[in-house]
Amino acid sequence: MQEGLRFAAIDVGSNAMRLFFCRVLENGHGPIFIKESMIRMPLRLGHDAFTENIISDNTCNKFVNTMYGFNSLIQAYDPISFKACATEAMRQAKNGLDLVNRVKQETGINLNIITGKEEANIIISTHIDRYLQMDQHCLYVDVGGGSTELTIIKNKETLFSKSFSIGSVRLLENQVAKKDWHKMKEWIIDKTSSIKNIQSIGSGGNINKILTLLKKSKGKSVTIKEIKNVIKKIKTYSIHDRIVKLELRPDRADVIVHAGKIYSRCMNWSGSDNMIVPQVGLADGMISRLYDDFKK
């Protein structure tokens, strides 16, 4: 058995934290990324950050404890290299940098708070071009708890990219105004109105779950109608029944409807008929970047 190259990534989102272990095999035809393990901690930093603009002491303590545990697992996995990135909740929290410093001091982990543009660039480095035809325009929609990253791509080149402070947790906490939606709509229409047959690609835990609920496999596509029908069905269930009967995680059950709204609106405004769901995200992009850096 080929040993392969080990890499690890920590994705600190607004709705949850993830530790991702990946082994990369090389066979002469390009790298093969083997997802070995993903550990998810449902720590919703966005609840504090988006309502109070600060992460509470209690949540900070839980966060540091989680990072300490992640660090122990990383040492046991012994990767070639690893990276830790934080997104919208940490960008907005007034004490975000203080928490970064505390994590470094108590766990040794260098946590990077990345910008929305950096987040988008990392996400689209996951070899999504395999799903696109030559000269085809793509609207990449990554929906997180605190923000949505939109990127327009053609032939592996980023043409336009923008981050919007519209996310599933923000919507849950009533922290998105009509003007925010208007800005997103204007940007999408401005950048896509002259493009025919644009293909959309969606990433994020919620669109992955919608794909699963539709009993479709990785890399398949969903239509706006299918997304709306799934959301309509989910709305008929209480939060408790979404967890018990639909087998949604508790921290997914209360935000998936909001996320579905973001995906369907982006598709509608861009004129995209269907959305490919490759089931990749920020952590996958981080691993891809680590591998590329290693090969330089």
Image: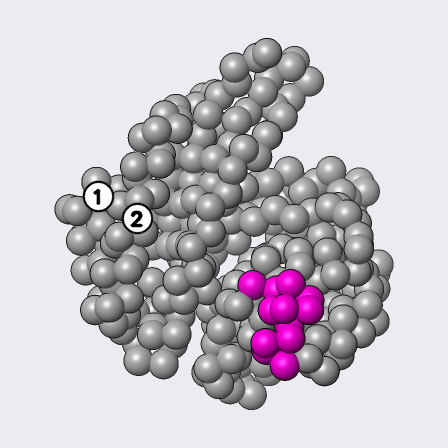
- Residue 54 x %, y %: 27, 73
Residue 67's mark? 2
Task: Tell me the residue at 42%/55% (across/down).
Answer: 41
Q: Amino acid at mark 2?
A: Met
Residue type at mark 1 is Thr
| Front-most of residues 279 and 233 | 233
Compared to 296, does 205 lie above or below?
A: below
Q: Choose top left, top right, bottom left or bottom right for residue 222.
A: bottom right
Name which of mark 2 and mark 1 comes first in the sequence. Answer: 2
Crowd rating for badge 2 (residues with CA inside 10 Å; few <14, some 14–19, many 20+):
many
Mark sitting on residue 220:
none
Q: Which residue: 65% across, 48% down?
A: 279
Q: Looking at the image, which residue sits at the far bottom?
A: 178
**Residue furthest out toward the front:** 244
Q: Is there a contact, CB below 8 Å, between mark 2 and mark 1?
A: yes
Residue shown at the point (39%, 74%) measured from the top left? 47
1 relative to 13 in the view: left or right: right
For mark 1, give the secondary structure. helix
Residue 31 placement: quadrant:
top right
Q: Residues within 10 Å of mark 1 (few under 14, many from 20)?
A: some
Residue 217 seen from this side:
yes
| Quarter of the figure with the C terminus | top left
Q: Is residue 154 above or below residue 260?
A: above
Residue 128 lies in the magenta-colored region: no
Which residue bears the numbered disc 1? 107
Q: Position of residue 64 (x, y in %)?
A: 25, 54
Q: Secondary structure at mark 2?
A: helix
Quadrant position of the N terminus in the picture: top right
Highlighted magenta segment, given as a residue range? 238-249
